[in-house]
């Protein structure tokens, strides 16, 4: 059953926590695996969280517009306190000032919790670097299970936006709440005795060290077969990213950890990518989390006015949040970048602009690149 925003679907009631939600320790987390041109995206994601959740658990919510944020006309502010946490490794250094500037709490781990040499499947060990977006680094997201100072952790990719109140999601008392990807690439849907893929860009966990250890053990010891059957011939994982978190998570929670409750969420509400007619038709006021995958990332310069209206709405919201950031700091608002190769990063001292050079290569729009200190 899918969890939406209306009355609980059949079977969902047992998963909803009772009592005062304000007592829950909540966090939105991102996994940062390397330095790169991602600081602006994470600043905007943080601003979108603060538009709905102005208050943090620890310290202040970071410098932003908070209660005064007016970028999102549909935001229904919540009284719940929510931290923003960046899960990262020692190799991430140049982005740290920007993350701190925008209120992210840094939680450093040595890595994803396993090494290539520890993987018992020789084929996976050889091919995992090409699995999904980031190879083994994608498994860093599993560290969310180790954030045991929180009761719930919502893991988001950096190319997402929080566009609505998700108090109903925080109320779920499950080990894993997740969304699925669409059927594609040879995936067999459930009606054909198959499984839909797990979407690794949006999921919520109830932190628990024992669950983390069991999933890591399953990954180290499992066999990943490219025969259409995926992990241990279970039917889970034979899809994009199936060799890492997008395959091992559904395998463990659908076939191994049966005592650990999991619940599928309505992807149109909580991980809308605009890739299904039903998701495209969802009113803007009902969007909770938007994920820039099918719809181009706003900083790419591909703002498609010919795309469906929801995609354009989400892209323009991203730029409105950015302008809200700039306004709160007394900076002039940046116009929406509508052409590839003309992106200008947010002009704050903490932002390492050299990381964004690949996003701006069109004269005369990239004068800022020439002002960068010479490398070496």
Image (spheres, helix red, strand yellow):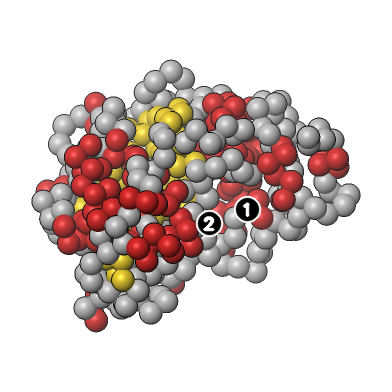
* Disc sitting over residue 298 in the figure: 1
Identity of the residue drawn at 47% across and 58% down: 129
Left or right, 323 with reference to 108: right
Query: In the picture, residue 168 is in which quadrant?
Result: top left
Q: Is residue 219 visible?
A: no
Spot occupied by residue 84 in the image (x, y as percentages of width and height):
43, 32
Identify the residue shown where x is 26% and y is 37%: 207
Residue 185 percent coordinates (x, y): 42, 76
Q: Which residue is mark 2?
A: 292
Q: Secondary structure at mark 1?
A: helix
Residue for point 29% across, 35% down: 146
Q: Earlier in the sequence, mark 2 or mark 1?
A: 2
Crowd band around label 2 with a 10 angstrom C-alpha radius: few (<14), some (14–19), many (20+): many
- Picture coordinates of residue 175 (x, y %)? 21, 45
Vertical placement of 133 versus 18: above or below? below
Give the secondary structure at mark 2: loop
**Closest to the observer, 2 or 261:** 261
Q: CA distance from mark 2 to mark 1?
A: 8 Å
Closer to the camera in the image, 51 or 295: 295
Answer above or below: position of 11 versus 53: below
User: Residue 208: which numbered mark, if any?
Assistant: none
Identify the residue at image location x=62%, y=53%: 298
Cβ atoms under marks 2 and 1 closer than 8 Å = yes
Q: Residue 373: where, in percent of width, then height?
A: 81, 33
* 10 Å crowding of disc 1: few (<14), some (14-19), many (20+): many
Q: Quadrant of the C terminus?
A: top right
Residue 81 visible within the image: yes
In the image as oriented, which residue stretches furthest toward the right?
Answer: 364
Give the mark count.
2
Location of residue 327 by image quarter: top right
């Amino acid at each position: 059953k899918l969890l939406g925003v209306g009355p609980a679907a059949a079977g969902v009631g047992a998963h909803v926590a009772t009592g005062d939600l304000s007592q829950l320790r909540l966090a939105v987390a991102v996994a940062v695996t390397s330095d790169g041109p991602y600081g602006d995206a994470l600043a905007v994601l943080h601003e979108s969280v603060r538009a709905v959740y102005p208050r943090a658990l620890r310290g202040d919510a970071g410098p932003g517009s908070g209660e005064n944020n007016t970028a999102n006309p549909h935001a229904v502010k919540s009284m719940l306190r929510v931290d923003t946490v960046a899960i990262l490794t020692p190799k991430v250094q140049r982005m740290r000032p920007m993350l701190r500037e925008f209120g992210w709490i840094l939680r450093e781990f040595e890595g994803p919790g396993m090494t290539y040499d520890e993987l018992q499947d020789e084929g996976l060990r050889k091919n995992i670097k090409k699995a999904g977006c980031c190879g083994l680094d994608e498994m860093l997201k599993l560290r969310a299970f180790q954030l045991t100072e929180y009761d719930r952790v919502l893991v988001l990719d950096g190319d997402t936006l929080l566009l609505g109140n998700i108090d109903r999601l925080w109320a779920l008392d499950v080990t894993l709440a997740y969304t699925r990807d669409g059927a594609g690439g040879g995936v067999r849907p459930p009606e054909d005795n198959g499984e839909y893929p797990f979407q690794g860009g949006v999921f919520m966990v109830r932190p628990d060290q024992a669950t983390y250890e069991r999933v890591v053990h399953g990954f180290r010891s499992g066999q990943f077969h490219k025969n259409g059957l995926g992990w241990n011939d279970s039917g889970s994982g034979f899809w994009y990213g199936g060799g890492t978190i997008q395959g091992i998570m559904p395998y463990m929670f659908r076939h191994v950890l049966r005592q650990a409750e999991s619940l599928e969420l309505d992807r149109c509400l909580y991980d809308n990518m605009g890739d299904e007619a039903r998701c495209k038709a969802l009113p803007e006021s009902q969007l909770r989390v938007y994920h820039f995958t099918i719809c181009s990332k706003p900083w790419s310069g591909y703002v498609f006015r010919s795309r469906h209206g929801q995609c354009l709405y989400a892209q323009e919201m991203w730029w409105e949040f950015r302008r809200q950031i700039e306004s709160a700091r007394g900076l002039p608002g940046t116009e929406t970048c509508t052409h590839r190769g003309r992106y200008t990063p947010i002009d704050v001292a903490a932002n390492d602009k050299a990381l964004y050079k690949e996003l701006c290569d069109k004269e005369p729009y990239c004068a800022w690149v020439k002002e960068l200190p010479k490398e070496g």
